[in-house]
Image (cartoon, rainbow, N blue to C red):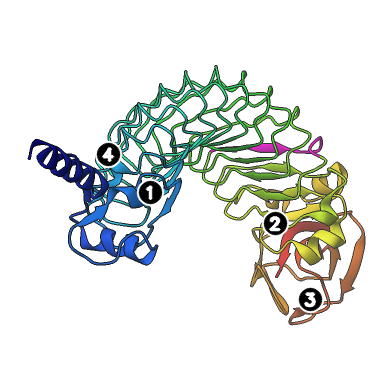
Amino acid sequence: MKTTLLILILSTTSLIGYTQNTNVPDANFEQALINLGYDDVIDGVVLTANINSITTLNVFNKSIADMTGIEDFVALTSLSCHQNQITNLQVNQLVNLNYLRCEENLLTSLDVTQNTLLTNLFCQENQLTSLDISQLTVLDYIRCANNQLTTLDISQNVILTTLFCDNNQLTNIDTSVNPLLWKFVCGWNLLSSLDLSQNPDLWDLNIESNQFTSIDVSHNLDLESIDCSTNQITNLDFSANTSLRGLTCRDNQISTLDLRLNTSLIALRCKNNLLTSVDIRNGNNTNFLDLNTTNNLNLTCIFVDDVAYAQANFPYIDASSTFVATQSACDALGIADEKLAFDLKIYPNPVSTSFYIQSNSKIESVSIYNVFGKMIRTYKPQESFSVSNLSSGIYTLKIASKNQFAFKKLLVK
């Protein structure tokens, strides 16, 4: 009798251990597990034995609100649960995890202090107000953008190469112990300064929509792309950045841009500034993919490698701007209207087909000069003056009356 009872007890204990279950209260989570073959019916539980040896789990975009049960996936090295409605994610017991995607959820907190093997962390587009990554010493890549972070300490992440922390509320970030950092996106924060002198590998930098008045990238010789738009920057020096390919600096207060040493440059977007001079004679204009200098109304001269090529390929400039190749050509545009020897009015100006001259003095002749100071057309007195065969750009009119001369700028559209 005692022997029979002992056998029964041992059998029952063995059965309980074999049929241990994990609670999975979220039906959408359980359905996702069924679809993956780890369960067979929605009943709020799944056999622990079916999940505790899984190394990769992908349940993104499954309308999951509750990830209860994930704590028993103890062998996971990769978890993707992004694009759901998760409000709480307990990954403390997933100590083997090295890849975590939980972006685009409703998380207000995320504890990854026990996940010391994490190399890739995607937690952007949540509602996080803090994030402790001090224990993630092998972290290589992190996206924590579009949250509500006010601080972010990366002093322990010494092998970090990629950091997206844009669209938060950061007022300061220290990258001095991250020498391998090569892509750094920190736009849409409250930053006013950055020391990038210890980031020699920096390749891509975005500081858009912050509070910078200047930025020093003289130590970042590998820099190829920078976006510093929508700040309060007045001066930019990229003379050391000969690898620079793309520069976006729109919506600042920059007055001059000298990019002659940036021989790899193929894109420049600098609209909405206070520019008076732009020089892109870098020998590489024929490879340019994008040039936009609009809304810089005091920008008369844009220095380029080849004027004809620029006129044919770079349409996004102000009507008051002209492509020139030399300083003398630019100087030719500087003939001021105040040198007029008699009263006159040119209209319409800008002109597309013909212009008219209204004057209190009899007009005897009209000549048109290009930006190189060469006369390209002369007219006898007539009612209107055709420019239909002229290329777009700024020209100078020389108007003669009674042995006097008046000079007037004419913009041909």
- Mark whose residue sits in front, 3 or 2: 2
Q: What span is in magenta?
A: 253-262
Helix, strand or loop status at disc 1: loop
Is label 3 or label 4 in front?
A: 4
Residue 260 position in % (x across, y down): 81, 38
Which badge, 3 or 4, is on the more N-terminal residue?
4
Q: Is residue 293 or residue 24 the one in the foreground? A: 24
Distance (Cα) linking label 2 and label 4: 47 Å
Mark 3 and 4 residues: CB-CB less than 8 Å, in contact?
A: no
Q: Are marks 2 and 4 in contact (CB under 8 Å)?
A: no
- Residue positioned most to the bottom: 383
Q: CA distance from mark 2 to mark 1?
A: 33 Å
- Residue under label 3, please give it: 387
Marks 1 and 4, Cα distance to the nearest angstrom? Answer: 15 Å
- Circles 3 and 2, Cβ within 8 Å, touching? The answer is no
Residue in view at x 48 percent, y 36 percent: 98
Residue on which disc 4 sits = 90
Magenta residues, dominant SS class: loop
Query: Does residue 287 appear in this view?
Result: yes
Q: CA distance from mark 3 to mark 2?
A: 29 Å
Query: Can you give x and y, in whole percent of width and height, for residue 291 in the image?
Result: 69, 55
In the image: residue 354, left or right of residue 375:
left
Would you name the residue on which mark 1 appears?
A: 103
Q: Earlier in the sequence, mark 2 or mark 1?
A: 1
Mark 3 or mark 2: which comes first in sequence? 2
**Dot 3 alpha-carbon crowd within 10 angstroms: few under 14, some 14 to 19, many 20 or more:** some
Counting every numbered tag in the picture gives: 4
> Which residue matches tag 2?
290
Depth-wise, is mark 3 or mark 1 nearer the camera?
Answer: 1
Q: Is residue 213 magenta?
A: no
Q: Earlier in the sequence, mark 2 or mark 4?
A: 4
